[in-house]
């Protein structure tokens, strides 16, 4: 990376939504910021650039980042919309770094012939590599909603399953397992089969 000391000048940085944060007391080393429930809504190119370096970046690299905390869905949706004019953010992208989705992706690695996106969309090369065993995030959300007795949400509100905190937490909980997701998804696939 050329001019690491100017990275912050050349880069738009990162915008992330957080569930909560706490700011520690001042000390000679600065202040600690503790985040809960982070989801990057803009900055994928920045994080991708830094992670693809192959070696840790110089200590001179500074990345501008802003954390937005809001429990108002109207504010959250506007932050997502106004911060993503380059690449349209899909509703499921909002949950890609969610702890439940990360756990489910890990559990899926142990299930043969089943792959799970878990809110991650990836780039064009990922779409090409996507196997026939991939369970798409939207369909997984729909299958869970339908199985758990909410066919209206499953059919009419597939995006809201991922964007609405209340709806999301009804179907994706700490008790949701990869095996259960495969079961619900398989039922939906069988019902939809010709």
Image (spheres, grey):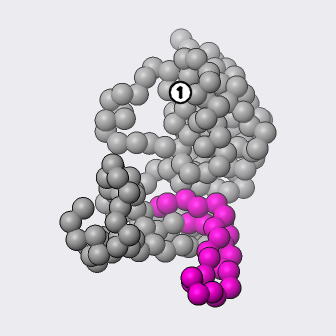
Q: Where is residue 93 in the image (x, y as percent from the top left)?
A: 50, 50
**Residue reaching furthest front?**
28
Name the residue that disc number 1 marks.
115
In the image: residue 54, left or right of residue 118: left
Asked whether the viewer can see residue 103, the reply is: yes
Q: Where is residue 28 in the image (x, y as percent from the top left)?
A: 59, 87
Q: Is residue 194 above or below residue 98?
A: above
Magenta stretch contains residue 141: no
In which quadrant of the rendered view does residue 12 lie? bottom left
SS at mark 1 in the image: strand
Residue interval drawn in magenta = 17-41
Residue at screen point 77% across, 35% down: 148
In the image: residue 67, left or right of residue 142: left
Residue at screen point 35% across, 61% down: 57
Magenta stretch contains residue 28: yes
Observer-nearest of 80 and 129 = 129
């Amino acid at each position: 990376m050329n001019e690491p000391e100017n990275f912050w000048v050349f880069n738009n940085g990162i915008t992330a939504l957080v569930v909560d944060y706490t700011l520690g007391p001042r000390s000679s080393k600065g202040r600690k910021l503790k985040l809960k429930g982070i989801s990057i809504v803009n900055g994928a190119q920045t994080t991708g650039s830094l992670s693809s370096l192959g070696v840790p970046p110089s200590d001179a690299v500074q990345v501008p980042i802003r954390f937005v905390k809001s429990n108002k869905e109207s504010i959250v949706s506007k932050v997502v919309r106004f911060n993503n004019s380059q690449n349209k953010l899909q509703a499921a992208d909002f949950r890609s770094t969610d702890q439940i989705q990360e756990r489910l992706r890990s559990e899926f690695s142990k299930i043969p012939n089943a792959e799970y996106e878990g809110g991650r969309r990836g780039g064009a090369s990922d779409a090409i590599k996507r196997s026939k065993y991939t369970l798409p995030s939207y369909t997984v959300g729909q299958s869970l909603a339908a199985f758990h007795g909410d066919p209206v949400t499953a059919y009419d509100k597939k995006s809201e399953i991922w964007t609405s905190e209340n709806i999301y937490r009804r179907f994706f909980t700490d008790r949701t397992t990869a095996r259960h997701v495969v079961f619900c998804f398989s039922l939906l696939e069988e019902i939809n089969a010709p």
